[in-house]
Image: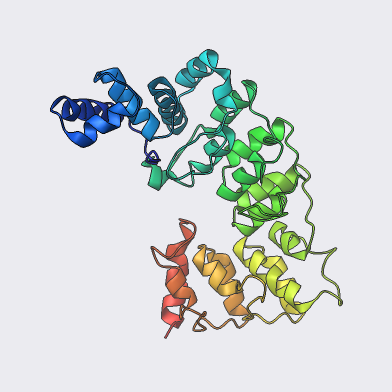
Amino acid sequence: MTYLPARPDLEQLRHQAKDLLREATRGAAEAVARIDAVSDRVTLASAQLAIAREYGFASWPKLKREVERREVLNRRDLDRLSSLLTEDPDLAVSLMVNWADHRLGASPLNYIAMIGFDHERLGLPADVAGTGRVAAALIDAGAPVNGQPGDSETPLMTAASYGDAEVAQVLIEAGADIEARASADAGGVPGGTALMHAAVFGMTTVLDLLVKAGAQPHGIESAAATGDITDWLTPETPLQARIRALAFAADHQRLSVIDQLMAAHTPVDAVDEMFGRQALRVAAHNGRPLSVRRLLDHGADPNLRDQHGNTALDLCQPGRRYLDHPGHDEVDAILRPLTT
C-alpha cells in the first residue's frame, strides 16, 4: 500500500488519476493492469478508484473525504469543519489513516494537538493559532475527551507532549482526566500522566496549566519540573533521583529548585543513569538561559562532552535543538566565550 504524504493535496491526487487514465488509454501495460485490478472499464472513475485503492481506501469519495478532513484541520477552518462533521459526525472520532507520518493512525483530537509543534513539516506558519477552537468543535461533535478505550495515551497527554496550551485548556475545561496514565507500551512516556509528559518534553506552559488544574507530581522529578520539591527532597532521596530532578528543574527554569538541589549536594555535572540527561546540556539544548547561568554559577563545566562528543554549546546550535526556543541565542552568547 502507498501512504499519503504529510501535506495533503487533493488536486495532485486528481492529476494522478487523470495521468493513470491517459496512460491506460494509450495502452501502457502497467497503467492498464492497475485499472484492471479494480474495474473492467477504462474510465476516469475507474482510474480514481485505482488510485484510492492504492492508498488503502475503499473508494475515491472515502479518499477525498480523508484528505479534506486533514486539510481542514491543518487550516483550522471551523466553517468547513462544521460542514464536514454535519455530513459525517464520525469524522470527529474515526482515526486518520494511511498517512505517511501517522501510519498507525491518529485521532482528530490528538492530531490537532500536534500540528503546532509539527508546523514546519506540515508547511504551516510558526504561529499556529485556533487549535483550541477546533478541539472544542471536535469534542462537541462527539470526540471522546479522554480518547478511546485502549488508546496508548489521552489527547491531554498528546497536548502536553507537543506543547499546545490551547488544546490542553479546552480538554481540561471539558473534564479530561488529568491523572490518567499512558499505557505501559506508549511511545512517549510509558505509564506517565499528562503532567509527566509536559515535564519530560519541556512544555512548561502546559505543565503550569495542569498544575493550576490540580495535577499532582508523583516523584521528585516531576515535582522539580513544577518548581516545588518541598515534600520530596529529604536526606533519604536517592542520588540518581536528585540528578534526574536537577535536569527537570533546569529544563523548566525552576531556579529555586536548582538551588535546593545544589544545597543538598547534588553533583551539578552528573549524568543520570536512567535517561542519560545532564542539567547544563538539557538547558542549552532547550534554550533555557536562566538555568544555564544558574548552573554555571554553581560550577557547571561547559566543556564536558556527552557520549557523542557534544558540549552544551553544540546542542544549542540550529539543527541540534529539540525545541525552537528564542532563548537559544542568549544561551549561545553565554556559553560560546566559555567553551574551548
Locate residue 60, reporting x and y percent. Answer: 38, 23
Up-down relation of residue 199 to residue 283 (above or below): above
Locate residue 82, reporting x and y percent. Answer: 51, 17
Q: Residue at point 50% right, 63% down? A: 287
Q: Indicate the quadrant containing the C terminus: top left, top right, bottom left or bottom right.
A: bottom left
Q: Nearer the viewer, residue 84 or 201?
A: 84
Identify the image's colour scheme: rainbow, by chain, secondary structure or one colour. Answer: rainbow
Q: Can you tell which quarter of the image residue 45 is in?
A: top left
Whether residue 33 sits left or right of residue 267 in the image: it is left
Q: Nearer the viewer, residue 39 or 20?
A: 39
Q: Is residue 12 visible?
A: no
| Residue at the limit of the structure toward the bottom, as seen here | 340
Up-down relation of residue 80 to residue 189 (above or below): above
Q: Nearer the viewer, residue 1 or 143?
A: 1
Whether residue 19 sits left or right of residue 211 in the image: it is left
Q: Can you tell which quarter of the image residue 159 is in?
A: top right
Locate residue 56, reporting x and y percent. Answer: 43, 34
Whether residue 246 sits left or right of residue 87 in the image: it is right
Q: Can you tell which quarter of the image residue 40 is in?
A: top left
Up-down relation of residue 133 to residue 126 (above or below): above
Q: Indicate the quadrant containing the N terminus: top left, top right, bottom left or bottom right.
A: top left
Q: Residue at point 71% right, 45% down? A: 210
Locate residue 175, reporting x and y percent. Answer: 74, 32
Q: Residue at point 58% right, 34% down? A: 109
